[in-house]
């Protein structure tokens, strides 16, 4: 999968892209991340990429010309059908479902804002999608872009060491994941649940499913409305709610 990232701060990306799963995915050719400095497409001698807002008020606004020029020259005719995503707190909220939807594309472009954000004509005439990573405001779109790249890469076949690793992740099927334990079997008076040491994989799977349902009911009951639940799951939830 190819990511083209348009940013004023390409230097903030490498440390994260060169670590762990993203590094392996890049080295194996599963993903390719190209960083483009929007300033390289500013045509005046000061390489200006922002200006004061018409109508007054504080802050600076990202100018349209360098961003249009950057995106058009990098993507060229390949733009047709390719998601050109503006990172903005005003966009649709990023979830695992959106990550799955976007991971089906072979190529996406991400545009990172700074200052007060973008000239509106970038939104109306250049981008095809707007994504927010949550209802709060960050200083720039670089962390949101990295979050998208990370979440999408995990969903690509072969990205994780364990091929089934993403299947049980929280939100993969609409539920939170069950609790994990590792060695030692006892720590500060707390033991690992007996079932996990039993070697009985059918029972372990059932325990994990029930823990997943319990956690989701306790912490994020809103998720249960949209989760994929079997009749057995529903019965288990009924017993939990009856006993609470
Ligand atoms: N004035 C803008 C507003 O109220 O919508 C916020 C601008 S913010 C300080 C600067 C940039 O950070 C945005 O253009 C966007 O690229 C990025 N950003 C901030 N919060 C974000 C969020 N929750 N999701 C995605 N991008 C965000």
Image (cartoon, helix red, strand yellow):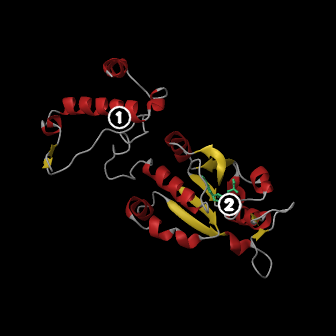
**From the Cβ of disc 2, is ligand 1 less than 8 Å away?**
no
Q: Distance of mark 1 from mark 2, alpha carbons?
A: 44 Å
Residue topped by disc 2:
75
- Per the image, label 2 sits on a secondary structure element best described as helix
Residue topped by disc 1:
215
Q: Quadrant of the C terminus?
A: top left
Viewer-side residue, 130 vs 240: 240
CB within 8 Å, label 1 to label 2: no
Q: State the image coordinates of residue 93 (x, y, percent, origin top left).
A: 59, 44
Q: Picture quarter containing residue 201?
A: top left
Q: Earlier in the sequence, mark 1 or mark 2?
A: 2
Q: State the image coordinates of residue 156 (x, y, percent, origin top left).
A: 45, 49
Q: Residues within 10 Å of mark 1 (few under 14, many from 20)?
A: some
Compared to residue 60, the image places residue 228 above or below, namely above
Q: Residues within 10 Å of mark 2 (few under 14, many from 20)?
A: some
Viewer-side residue, 79 vs 111: 111
Residue 196 appears anywhere in the view: yes
Viewer-side residue, 243 vs 186: 243
Q: Residue drawn at (51%, 62%), measured in percent from left and top?
A: 32
- Per the image, label 1 sits on a secondary structure element best described as helix
Q: Residue furthest right?
A: 55
Q: In the rendered view, does 61 fall on the left or right side of 84?
A: right
Q: Give ligand 1's quarter of the image.
A: bottom right
Q: In the rendered view, does 190 fall on the left or right side of 123?
A: left
């Amino acid at each position: 999968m190819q990511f083209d990232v348009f940013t004023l701060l390409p230097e903030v990306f490498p440390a994260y892209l060169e670590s762990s799963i993203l590094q392996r995915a890049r080295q194996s050719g599963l993903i390719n991340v190209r960083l483009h400095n929007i300033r390289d497409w500013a045509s005046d001698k000061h390489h200006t990429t922002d200006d004061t807002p018409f109508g007054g008020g504080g802050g600076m606004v990202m100018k349209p010309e360098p961003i249009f020029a950057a995106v058009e020259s990098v993507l060229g005719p390949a733009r047709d059908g390719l998601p050109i995503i503006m990172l903005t707190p005003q966009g649709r909220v990023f979830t695992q479902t959106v990550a799955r939807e976007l991971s089906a594309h072979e190529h996406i472009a991400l545009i990172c804002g700074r200052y007060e954000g973008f000239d509106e004509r970038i939104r109306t005439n250049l981008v095809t999608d707007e994504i927010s990573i949550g209802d709060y405001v960050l200083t720039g779109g670089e962390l949101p872009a990295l979050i998208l790249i990370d979440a999408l890469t995990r969903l690509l076949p072969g990205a994780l060491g364990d091929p089934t690793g993403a299947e049980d992740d929280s939100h993969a099927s609409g539920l939170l994941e069950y609790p994990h334990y590792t060695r030692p079997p006892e720590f500060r008076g707390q033991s690992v649940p007996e079932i996990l040491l039993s070697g009985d994989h059918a029972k372990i799977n059932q325990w994990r499913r029930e823990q997943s349902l319990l956690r989701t009911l306790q912490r994020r009951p809103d998720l249960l409305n949209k989760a994929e639940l079997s009749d057995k799951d529903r019965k288990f939830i009924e017993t939990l709610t009856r006993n609470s």
